[in-house]
Image (tube, rainbow, N blue to C red):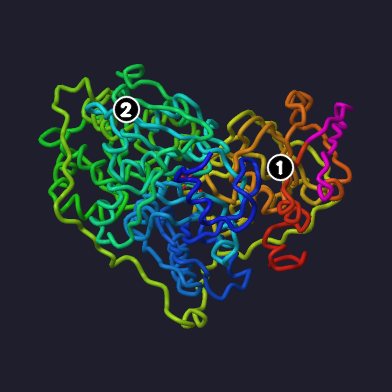
């Protein structure tokens, strides 16, 4: 098996291991992407590592998540990030310039390159033939320091697209179709590679929509070829010189094969509260709605707001609907204005928000109690919108706009309206004024980091003990997302640069007394939690490992883990254990006392561990499945401790 775009990208960046499925590989990383909600931690990590300057070809720090400034905290973070970008030699994208993923594709992405990003939607850059992977901040910091990125060689999942999309069906419906077929865990351990004649009808930004939400399938990444459409896209951005062709060989073969006939697709929608809960729109049509939000990294293209603008032209949205419009980038906003689309949206009742993530991450736009919210965003995990018991549905801009017009969930094919045709503008609106370049030469070394009072240094991480014991504070089910482990939202996000402060929100969605109960046993040896399959799906936020670790979490025993979160647990010294026999999940209840002996010894020897449930007087085996490299990290207590070559605390 060879000749795929994914293989070509991997082979050209392989610095350790062999590209055989299931084996650990080390990849050279050309570019990094950090955003503010995870980036503050990355910059603190670079500071703790004493890095003189990043060693990547391009590293960009975006500010797109923490945009509301209810007090000094987010504004202080912006200043800190600006100073850190100058200090470590990064580009800085100012607040208001837009969401990292589309801006990166427009301004910095280069076909054939690798990118590591501290955001799970980083694979969106696969739209232009990059191998882009989401990871915890500490790994991105390591990549900035010139270290390879280590991961398990995934299977390559070839998805052959044939046919053309019917009217009223767009890129979002393609990825929703895959989520309908395979669910939120369906892409784990795989890179999705799209190929086939159906690609011809998908623009580079349509491909971005599909690549972005590959994260919802749990995939390691998504890649598209760098073909004529990518060349057209880069030329329209004034960057044709960055184009290189990267296509699969005619005889390329894939580990897993699948076909989607685009002409058979219909408008789809993900019901609350999982992106995998997908049904045809007509199945839920007629339900009254209270809110529609357009935009975000999952529908960032100009067409994703221009088509809605054409749909609402000369019409009014329903008086029971809040019609929120979030342009994903400054460039899109400027183009919407310049091409006359903006006036149609505003006249139809749009509430226009600044370019950024906004409600996608609960930074404002929380829906009212019991009101349905339709969003073109990538995720609808429970409570992520900022409203507990929320009812968030995910759909295409066409479905969202049709529903905004009628006030009920509506299949756009049922509107009495001709399907608008979008033609890209003749001139592009490239404006780089909000991108601050890195300082040249050694000038960066003199820059002082600007730290407001809410920015706390990293906590310390002691080496792995030989005995882990304590109560099971939570027993959870399948598909627990990082939004449930450590929520985002306007109230919590401002504490992303302060682990002790953010820790009190850990597992808040599941049990709001968790942090108090964990603190009570922290000094007595800590605690454990138990979960089902796909534990930690969703975001890359390392806070979901750091905050529980700070509260004394020493091990998670689960049926299986999501890739990024499992690595984040390892990076901060929390043991990710899987049941040797999955049925042993039933041998534990919340509140049971678990004990594991000879921990460091057995982890070092690569042997399974034995868990003693003292409450139920039973024992069972668990596996850690750690690679040699991960074992070293676990023994040291954290990746950062290991990197500094000492087991002493990283900072006080
Ligand atoms: C998300 O969509 O969940 C986020 C917010 O972008 C996260 C990053 C974060 O938690 O800061 C992600 O996707 O990794």
Q: Position of residue 461 (x, y in %)?
A: 73, 59
What element does badge 2 sit on?
helix
Q: Circle 2 is placed at which residue position?
A: 262
Q: Is residue 172 left or right of residue 339?
A: right
Question: Nearest the camera: 281 or 581?
Answer: 581
Residue at 55% across, 32% down: 185
Q: Position of residue 298 (x, y in %)?
A: 37, 42
Mark nearest the camera among 1 and 2 is 2
Residue at 56% across, 76% down: 52
Q: Could you tell me if the residues under marks 1 and 2 are in contact, i.e. CB atoms within 8 Å?
A: no
Q: How packed is label 1: few (under 14 Cα within 10 Å), some, or many (20 or more)?
A: many
What is the residue that sits farthest to the top in this orientation? 283
Marks 1 and 2, the one that precedes in the sequence: 2
Q: Circle 1 is placed at which residue position?
A: 576
Residue 585 got which mark? none
Instruction: State the extent of the magenta-drawn residues as a range.
Output: 603-622
Question: Nearest the camera: 214 or 415?
Answer: 214
Instruction: Tell me the distance, in whole angstroms, between the alpha carbons under discs 1 and 2.
Output: 40 Å
Residue at 27% across, 29% down: 165
Q: Position of residue 522 (x, y in %)?
A: 77, 49
Q: Is residue 600 left or right of residue 54?
A: right
What element does badge 1 sit on?
strand
């Amino acid at each position: 098996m060879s000749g795929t775009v994914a293989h070509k990208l991997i082979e050209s960046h392989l610095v350790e291991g062999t590209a055989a499925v299931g084996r650990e590989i080390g990849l050279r990383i050309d570019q990094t992407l950090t955003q503010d909600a995870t980036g503050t931690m990355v910059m603190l990590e670079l500071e703790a590592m004493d890095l003189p300057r990043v060693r990547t070809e391009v590293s960009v720090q975006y500010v797109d998540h923490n945009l509301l400034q209810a007090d000094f905290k987010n504004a202080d973070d912006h200043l800190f990030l600006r100073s850190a970008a100058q200090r470590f030699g990064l580009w800085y994208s100012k607040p208001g310039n837009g969401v990292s993923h589309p801006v990166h594709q427009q301004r910095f992405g280069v076909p054939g390159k690798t990118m590591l990003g501290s955001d799970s939607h980083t694979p969106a850059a696969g739209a232009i033939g990059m191998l882009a992977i989401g990871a915890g901040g500490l790994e991105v910091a390591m990549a900035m320091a010139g270290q390879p990125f280590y991961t398990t060689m995934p299977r390559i999942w070839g998805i052959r697209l044939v046919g053309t999309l019917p009217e009223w069906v767009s890129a979002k419906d393609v990825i929703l179709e895959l989520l309908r077929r395979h669910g939120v865990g369906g892409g784990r351990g795989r890179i999705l590679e799209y190929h086939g004649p159906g690609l011809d009808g998908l623009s580079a930004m349509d491909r971005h929509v599909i690549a972005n939400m590959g994260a919802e399938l749990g995939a390691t990444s998504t890649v598209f070829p760098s073909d004529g459409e990518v060349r057209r896209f880069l030329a329209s951005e004034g960057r044709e010189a960055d184009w290189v062709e990267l296509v699969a060989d005619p005889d390329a073969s894939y580990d897993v094969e699948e076909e989607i006939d685009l002409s058979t697709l219909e408008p789809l929608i993900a019901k609350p509260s999982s992106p995998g809960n997908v049904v045809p729109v007509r199945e839920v049509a007629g339900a009254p709605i209270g809110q529609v939000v357009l935009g975000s990294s999952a529908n960032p293209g100009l067409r994703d707001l221009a088509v809605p603008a054409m749909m609402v032209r000369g019409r009014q949205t329903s008086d029971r609907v809040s019609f929120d419009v979030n342009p994903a980038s400054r460039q899109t906003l400027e183009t919407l204005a310049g091409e006359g689309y903006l006036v149609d949206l505003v006249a139809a009742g749009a509430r226009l928000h600044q370019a950024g993530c906004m409600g996608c991450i609960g930074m404002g736009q929380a829906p009212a109690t019991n009101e349905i919210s339709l969003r073109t965003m990538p995720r609808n995990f429970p409570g992520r919108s900022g409203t507990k018991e929320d009812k968030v549905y995910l759909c295409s801009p066409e479905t969202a706009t049709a529903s905004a017009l009628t006030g009920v969930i509506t299949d756009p094919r049922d509107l009495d309206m001709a399907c608008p045709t979008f033609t890209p503008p003749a001139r592009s609106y490239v404006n780089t004024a909000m991108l601050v370049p890195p300082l040249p030469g050694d000038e960066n070394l003199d820059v002082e980091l600007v730290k407001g009072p809410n920015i706390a240094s990293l906590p310390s991480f002691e080496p792995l003990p030989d005995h882990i014991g304590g109560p099971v504070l939570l027993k959870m089910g399948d598909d627990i997302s990082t939004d449930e482990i450590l929520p985002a939202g306007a109230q919590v996000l401002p504490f992303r640069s302060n682990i002790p402060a953010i820790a009190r929100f850990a597992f808040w969605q599941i049990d709001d007394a968790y942090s108090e109960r964990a603190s009570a046993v922290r000094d007595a040896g800590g605690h454990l939690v138990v979960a089902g399959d796909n534990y930690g799906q969703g975001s890359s936020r390392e806070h979901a490992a750091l905050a529980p670790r700070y509260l004394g979490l020493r091990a998670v025993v689960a049926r299986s883990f999501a890739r990024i979160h499992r690595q984040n647990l390892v990076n901060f010294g929390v043991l990710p254990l899987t049941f040797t026999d999955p049925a042993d999940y039933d041998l534990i209840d919340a509140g049971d006392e678990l004990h594991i002996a000879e921990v460091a010894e057995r982890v070092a020897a690569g042997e399974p561990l034995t868990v003693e449930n003292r409450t139920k007087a039973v024992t069972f085996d668990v596996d850690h499945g750690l690679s040699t490299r991960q074992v070293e990290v676990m023994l040291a207590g954290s990746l950062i401790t290991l990197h500094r070559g000492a087991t002493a605390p990283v900072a006080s």
